[in-house]
Image: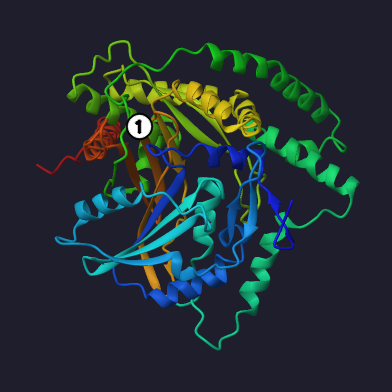
Amino acid sequence: MMQQGKPLEPMSSIDSFWLSMDEPTNLMVITGLMEFDEPLDHDAVCALLRERLLVYNRFRQRVVWPTSTLGRPFWDEDLNFDIQNHVIRMALPTPRDKATLQRMIGDLSVIQLDRNRPLWRAHIIENYGEGCVLFFRIHHAIADGIALIRLLLSMTDTQPNLSFRTAGESVEQPQTRRSRKKRPFALAAGPLDLFVRAAKTTLKTAARTTGAVYDEFTKTAAYPPYLSRLIRLYGRIGLESATVLAKLALMPSDSKTSLKGKLGIRKNVCWSPPLPLDDVKEIGLYFRCTVNDVLMAAVAGALREYLLDRGDDLADAELRVAIPVNVRPDSPDVELGNQFSLVLLSLPVNLDDPVRRLRETRKRMRTLKESADAFVGFQMLKIMGVPPRGITKRGADFFSGKFTGVLSNVPGPRQPLFLTDKKIKNMMFWVPRSGEVALGVSIISYAGFVTLGIATDRRVAPDPERITDAFGREFAELLKLARMDVLQRAPVRRRPAGRR
C-alpha cells in the first residue's frame, strides 16, 4: 500500500490488537509521570525529546487504516508533525497539592489521543508546590509498558545537564548511539539470515517464559546432556499449551466483588508515599521469599481490607489479576512494539493472616513461573490481532471477565536520575485496562524506594487512596512481624557479674 509516494509500514498483529481495544470507558493508553522539586524549561524538554525520542519512527508516525474494512492498519510518516502539538504546558490549580494533581491526571487520562497525529503526548504540569510534573501519555499500540519505561529512562542521565544539549553543541554522539537502536526497522541481509534470527528469537522467548536460561541452548554443542534437557522443556511447553488454553476457556468468571461493575468514563488515580526498598528486602529475607512476593502479598492484604470495608463477603473469594510478563530477549537496546504476555494470578484475599497470605502468594508465584502460561498467552495475543475488530473485541471481553484487575511490577533504576538539568524526585506509571476491568495496580522502584500506584473507574471504585493507605498498613505489619521475631530469637547478653 502506498500513500504520498512513500510505502506504509504494516502494523503487527499484536500492536493492532491493542489499538483495536480502545473504548471510551477504557483507553489503551499507558501513562506515567516524573516528579521534580523545581520547574522544567519547556524549550529544554522539547529539545531533549527531539534528540532522544523522535529518533524512533513511531513518535513521528500516525495510524492509517486500509480503504476496506478488513485488514490491519499501517504506520505512516506525519508530514505535518510539530512537537508543539505534543508537549503541552499546564498550570495546576490551587491548592496545588497532591490531591489536586491526582485529580488532574485522572481527568487527563480519559482524553482520547488524536488519531490524525502520532499517538503520544507529554504534559508539563507546573505549580506543583515549588516544582512540577512531567506527565506522559503513550498509546499501547506503540509499545508495551516495559519498553516505554525503558524508553523514558533512556532520555535521562545520572548527572545534571548531560541529557540537555544547548544550541551549537555537538549531538553527534547521542545520534550515533541511538541510531543503532533503530535497527529493529532495518531489512535483514537475506532470507536465511531472517530465518535464523526468527528462530533464535522464538527459542529465546520460549526459554524466558518458562524460567529457563537461553545460554543453556548455546551449550548443547559442547555439552550434549543439555540437549535432552531442552527436549524435555520444549516438549512440556507443547503438552501444556493445550492444557493452558483449556484452563482459560473453562475458567469461571472472577469472584463478584465491589471492584466489578458497569464502567463510566471518568477515572481516578493515586499513588502511595515511597517505601524503603531495603525494608522490602528485609521482609523477604526473613520469610524466605522474593521482593516481588512481598509486594504482591501486601497488595492482596490491601485489597482485602478495602473490600471488607465496603461490605464484601470474602470467605470463599479469590481475586484474580492479570500480570504482564516481558518476553523480550535480554538486550540493553530499546525495542518498541508489544512483546509481553499476560498470566493470571489469584490473590488470596480470603486469608485473614498476613503471614499466611505471604506464603500462599509465594507458592502461587512459583507455580506460575514454572508453567507455560506466559508462552501460550503471548501466542494468543498475537493471534487475537488478526481477525476483524468485532471478533477481536468479543474474544478480549470474554477473557477480561476472568480477572478483576491488571497488576504490573517494574524494577526501576537504583540511582537518582536527571532529565535535562533537573533531578527526578520520584516516578510512577499506570497500566491500561481492557473490557470491563476497573482496577489497575502499578508498582515501581526508584533510587532505593518503592511506590504503589492505583487507577480505578470512578463509578466502580471512587476512592483508590484507601487502597494505597491499606497497602502502607499491610506493609508495616509484615515488617513489624519480621523484626519482632528476629528480636525474640536474638540471644540475650548476660551482664558480667560485678565484684562484691
Q: Is residue 97 above or below residue 197?
A: below
Residue that extends furthest to the front in the rendered view of this protein: 67
The residue at 41%/20% (across/down) is 360
Quadrant, the C terminus: top left
Left or right, 414 with reference to 465: right
Q: Is residue 25 above or below residue 10?
A: above
The residue at 32%/31% (across/down) is 263
In terms of image quadrants, where is residue 305? Answer: top left
The residue at 18%/25% (across/down) is 309
Residue 276 in sight here: yes
Residue that extends furthest to the left in the rendered view of this protein: 500
- Disc 1 marks which residue? 438
Q: How many marks?
A: 1
- Relative image position of residue 487 (x, y in whole percent): 26, 35
- Relative image position of residue 244 (x, y in whole percent): 60, 18
In terms of image quadrants, where is residue 35? Answer: bottom left
